[in-house]
């Protein structure tokens, strides 16, 4: 995991397994059948404290694409948070589709 935000569309079982090994340092928690599934992985990169999250807020078809939009939640300035580097991420398993998957950050960033 690095300092850069990272987004991936996972279409192969080998890629699915590599991502899980990177995240958890162990085998994937569920089987991935590339004939039936694809997945989306969004990682925010390193953040300076706890309290950060990534959330997929919208999924919709746009022409020949399946668009997933996400936002970053940031801790409110007056909130007590864990004082350690964190790497927020989310992964969703989707039914396989012929649509091209597009991942984009929505305009809003929320402080909580």
Image: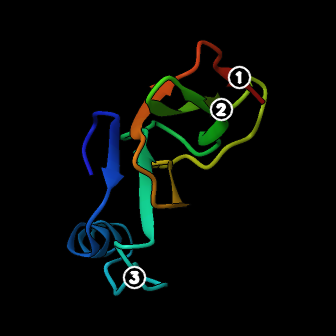
Q: Which residue is mark 1?
A: 110
Q: Position of residue 74 (x, y in %)?
A: 64, 29
Q: Nearer the viewer, residue 15 or 78?
A: 15
Circle 2: is it few (<14), some (14-19), or many (20+) Cα within 10 Å?
some
Q: Quadrant of residue 23?
A: bottom left
Residue drawn at the location 65% of the way across and 42% of the way down: 51
> What is the distance, in whole Å, between disc 1 and disc 3 at their CAs?
31 Å
**Mark 1 or mark 3: whose residue is earlier in sequence:** 3
Q: Nearer the viewer, residue 6 or 97?
A: 97
Q: Quick check: 9 above or below 100?
A: below
The dot on residue 28 is 3
Q: Quadrant of the C terminus?
A: top right
Q: Is residue 85 visible?
A: no
**Mark 1 or mark 2: whose residue is earlier in sequence:** 2
Q: Nearer the viewer, mark 1 or mark 3?
A: 3
Q: Nearer the viewer, residue 95 or 75?
A: 95
Q: Position of residue 32 (x, y in %)?
A: 40, 78
Q: Which residue is mark 2?
A: 73
Residue drawn at the location 68% of the way across and 32% of the way down: 75
Q: Number of marks in the image?
A: 3
Circle 3: is it few (<14), some (14-19), or many (20+) Cα within 10 Å?
some
**Mark 2 or mark 3: whose residue is earlier in sequence:** 3
Left or right: where does residue 58 sit relative to residue 17?
A: right
What SS does tag 2 mark? strand
The dot on residue 86 is none
Q: Are marks 1 and 2 in contact (CB under 8 Å)?
A: yes
Q: Position of residue 53 (x, y in %)?
A: 61, 42
> What is the distance, in whole Å, between disc 2 and disc 3 at their CAs?
26 Å
> What is the distance, in whole Å, between disc 1 and disc 2 at their CAs?
5 Å
Q: Quick check: 97 above or below 35?
A: above
Q: Quadrant of residue 57?
A: top right
Q: Is residue 84 visible?
A: yes
């Amino acid at each position: 995991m690095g300092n850069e935000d990272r987004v991936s569309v996972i279409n192969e079982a080998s890629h699915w397994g590599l991502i899980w090994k990177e995240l958890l340092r162990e085998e994937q928690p569920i089987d991935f059948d590339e004939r039936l599934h694809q997945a989306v992985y969004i990682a925010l990169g390193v953040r300076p404290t706890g309290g950060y999250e990534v959330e997929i807020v919208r999924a919709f078809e746009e022409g020949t694409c399946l668009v997933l939009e996400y936002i970053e939640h940031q801790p409110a300035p007056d909130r007590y948070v864990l004082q350690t580097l964190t790497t927020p991420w989310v992964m969703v398993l989707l039914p396989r589709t012929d649509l091209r998957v597009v991942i984009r950050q929505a305009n809003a960033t929320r402080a909580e």
